[in-house]
């Protein structure tokens, strides 16, 4: 199946702001290390920048970031990979969010019928609008974290699919959800779903590594929530450093052909983000 892509979640200003937080630096401290004025760094965070390539390299180096990704974002040329190899159908359920999208995902065996849902989008209307007609039943719902843009559609899902169990990170405030901890492995509707506890964006945040039970060597799917995006990472609202550690862990442990389905922005792969993501080092 051909999956329609969407815009990147972040641009240069966003990744500089996130990089500062992860490095524990102020614009002034970065200015000294990178020999770029603090005023220009602040302007860049406000999306006004005119850095030269050597300046971008110095900024990336001072923030411990991947210069290839920083240069690509600054030039508005961040590449995206071809998505292939999944042994099941993946439906991104996208809702407008700011200038980009908030994404939920539905997986099925391609004949339709029953699916497994990851996050729910912000509300019932957006969910209904994006829902593929051929998927009639939800076997289970897995939530990455409890934020309205990702869980607001849950009451509607429960109303339509009252038998579907709901799983969420331990500590997430979701009534009636069962908590999943790091390493939990579940079999559900023909899929093997492994939980990776990935605190950083929020304290209670999970990513899910999904394989088809009958195709253990095919490309897996990583539902990455607000941990890892194409060309960026989530905001570290709980802890920027923990988020960076979890990004490194996930990039290291997932196979290169893993398809990444992030909470915002387009699909990508582990191999692609290892090479290009500004936060992959
Ligand atoms: Fe989000």
Image (spheres, helix red, strand yellow):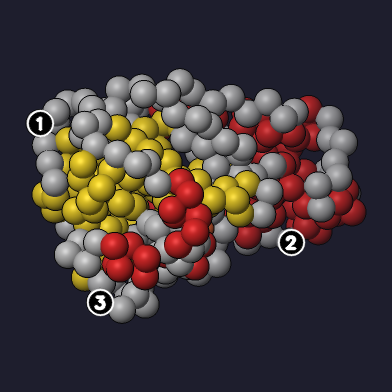
Q: Can you say whether 131 is above or below 165 in the image?
A: above
Q: For residue 85, say whether it is visible.
A: yes
Mark 3 and mark 2: Cα distance apart in space: 42 Å
Tell us which disc is closer to us: 3 or 2: 3
Residue 253 is situated, as x and y percent measured from the top left of the image, at: 30, 40
For image coordinates 14% across by 50% down, the residue present is: 188
Question: Along the polypeptide, which appears first: circle 1 or circle 3?
Answer: 3
Tell me the element at label 3: loop
- The residue that disc 2 covers is 26
- The one nearer the camera, 124 or 8, is 124
Report whether 1 appears left or right of 147.
left
Cβ atoms at labels 3 and 2 below 8 Å apart: no
Tell me the element at label 1: loop
- The one nearer the camera, 139 or 52, is 139
For image coordinates 84% across by 35% down, the residue present is: 51
Binning the other alpha carbons within 10 Å of mark 3 as few (below 14), some (14 to 19) or many (20 upward) gives: few
Q: Quadrant of the N terminus?
A: top left
Mark 2 and mark 1: Cα distance apart in space: 50 Å
Mark 1 and mark 3: Cα distance apart in space: 31 Å
In the drawing, what numbered circle is on residue 279? none
Tell me the element at label 2: loop
Question: Along the polypeptide, which appears first: circle 3 or circle 2?
Answer: 2
In the drawing, what numbered circle is on residue 214? 1
Residue 236 is situated, as x and y percent measured from the top left of the image, at: 54, 61
Report whether 46 appears left or right of 85.
right
- The one nearer the camera, 128 or 182, is 128
Cβ atoms at labels 2 and 1 below 8 Å apart: no
- The residue that disc 3 covers is 176
Report whether 34 appears left or right of 205.
right
Binning the other alpha carbons within 10 Å of mark 1 as few (below 14), some (14 to 19) or many (20 upward) gives: few
Question: Which corner quadrant of the image does residue 39 belong to?
Answer: bottom right
């Amino acid at each position: 199946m051909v999956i329609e892509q969407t815009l990147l979640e972040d641009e240069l200003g966003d990744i500089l702001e996130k990089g500062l937080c992860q490095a524990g630096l102020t614009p002034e401290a970065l200015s000294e290390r990178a020999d770029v004025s603090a005023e220009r760094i602040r302007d860049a965070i406000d999306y006004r920048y005119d850095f030269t390539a050597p300046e971008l390299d110095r900024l990336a180096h001072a923030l411990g970031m991947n210069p290839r990704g920083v240069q690509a974002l600054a030039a508005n040329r961040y590449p995206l990979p071809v998505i292939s190899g999944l042994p099941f159908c993946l439906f991104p359920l996208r809702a407008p969010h700011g200038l980009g999208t908030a994404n939920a995902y539905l997986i099925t065996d391609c004949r339709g019928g029953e699916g497994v849902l990851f996050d729910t989008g912000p509300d019932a209307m957006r969910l209904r609008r994006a829902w593929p007609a051929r998927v009639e039943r939800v076997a289970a719902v897995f939530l990455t974290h409890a934020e309205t843009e990702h869980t607001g559609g849950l009451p509607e899902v429960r109303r339509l699919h009252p038998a579907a169990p709901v799983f969420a990170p331990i500590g997430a405030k979701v009534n009636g959800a069962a908590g999943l901890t790091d390493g939990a492995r579940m079999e559900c509707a023909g899929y093997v779903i492994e939980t990776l506890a990935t605190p950083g964006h929020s304290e209670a945040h999970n990513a899910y590594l999904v394989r088809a039970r009958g195709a253990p060597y095919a490309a897996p799917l990583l539902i990455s929530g607000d941990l890892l995006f194409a060309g960026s990472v989530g905001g570290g609202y709980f802890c920027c450093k923990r988020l960076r550690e979890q990004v490194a862990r996930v990039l290291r442990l997932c196979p290169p052909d893993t398809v990444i389905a992030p909470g915002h922005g387009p699909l990508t792969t582990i191999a692609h983000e290892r090479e290009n993501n500004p936060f992959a080092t």
